[in-house]
Amino acid sequence: MANPVGTDNGPVGRALGLAAKIETLTAGEQRLDTAVKGLTLHRWDHPTDPTSYLLPPSICLIGQGQKQVVVGEGTFIYDDCHFLITSVDLPVVTRIIEASEEKPYLGLSMELDLRVLSQLMMEHPATVERPSKDSLGIAVSALTGSLLNAFNRLLELLETPEDVSALAPLIQQEIFYRLLSGEQGARLRQITASGQHGYRIVRAIDWLKQHFNESMKVEVLADKAGLSVSAFHHHFRAMTAMTPLQFQKKMRLSEARRLMLTEHIDASRAAFQVGYESPSQFSREYSRLFGAPPMQDIRRLVQASA
């Protein structure tokens, strides 16, 4: 059983240490893509409005503050004593729910390397726990002292850039090993072992990511996954908490939002680019997800970031 933070030597100090490192490294920036592959640091001085995007397989830690992640109908909240893990690409809606200028939200996310995870499982089969009945590709777990210690050492490497290329992969491998040997090991195994249903759903999601703006036939996706249509529906929903159509819709709307916000195109053009044939349908579904019509939502986002 995993030891939660608070049962190791000096865990509170290490948690505060993680927050201090993130605060120093971000230097007031809201986002920092680091020299360590897949590692991003985040800082917010205030709670945020809901933001929608596709979250890749990742582990997310918080040094200070609290965050909410919504997937389908499920809500996940984590803080400096817990970490969030996703084992598959998921359309999520997130928001920072605890942050202030005096105590900013300080967090990090690191993408999982499925190739390294697969290699570790072959080399250390004893680290893999029994298959879990929970197939959902997201979970929150208590943060262990050993996992927190590894992340602290990973952030310390950023202070000596010349060491990153040689040592960061070793520490990341240690992190993946500890994930596999912990309570989330079974969840990771199902998306890296080729005989598992989770692995087959991942292949279908990879196709969806590349073709989200095209018409989708569930029969084609099921065939790519090597499953019957009924089995595909069952396992897709079990892993993502949504149907393939809902998954595609959220990817389309998130990409349209990004296009309007960063490339400054109008709503109709964004709708057609992501695969909608009807701008009015796009506007209705956009409003339902983001709480406001497209251009009104974009104006609000621009004002909030000004």
Image: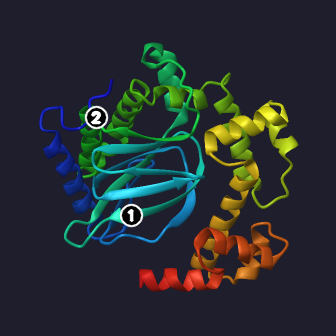
> In front here: 300 or 20?
300
Closer to us: 265 or 48: 48
What is the crowding at mark 1: few (fewer than 14 residues within 10 Å), some, or many (at least 20)?
many
Residue 148 in the image, given as x and y percentages of width and height: 27, 39
Res 6 → quadrant: top left
- Give the secondary structure at mark 2: loop
Q: Which disc, if any, is residue 66?
A: none
Q: Measuring 71% from the left and 32% from the top, which residue is drawn there?
A: 200
Residue drawn at the location 44% of the way across and 26% of the way down: 180
Relative to 168, 194 lies left or right: right
Residue 297 visible in the current orientation = yes
Which of 1 and 304 lies nearest the eye of the viewer? 1
Q: Is disc 1 placed on a helix, strand or loop?
A: strand
Count every numbered label the image shows and give the total. Answer: 2
Residue 271: x and y in percent read 75, 74
Give the alpha-carbon distance from disc 2 to disc 1, as whole Å. 23 Å
Residue type beneath disc 2: Thr
Q: Is residue 35 visible?
A: no
Percent position (x, y) of residue 112?
Answer: 48, 40
Q: Which mark is residue 96?
A: 1
Give the residue drawn at x 59%, y 71%: 290
**Identity of the residue furthest to the front in this view:** 73
Left or right: 94 with respect to 196? left
Q: Which mark is residue 144?
A: 2
Residue 170 picture location, percent across and down: 35, 33
Left or right side of 110 for 62 = left
CB contact under 8 Å: marks 2 and 1: no
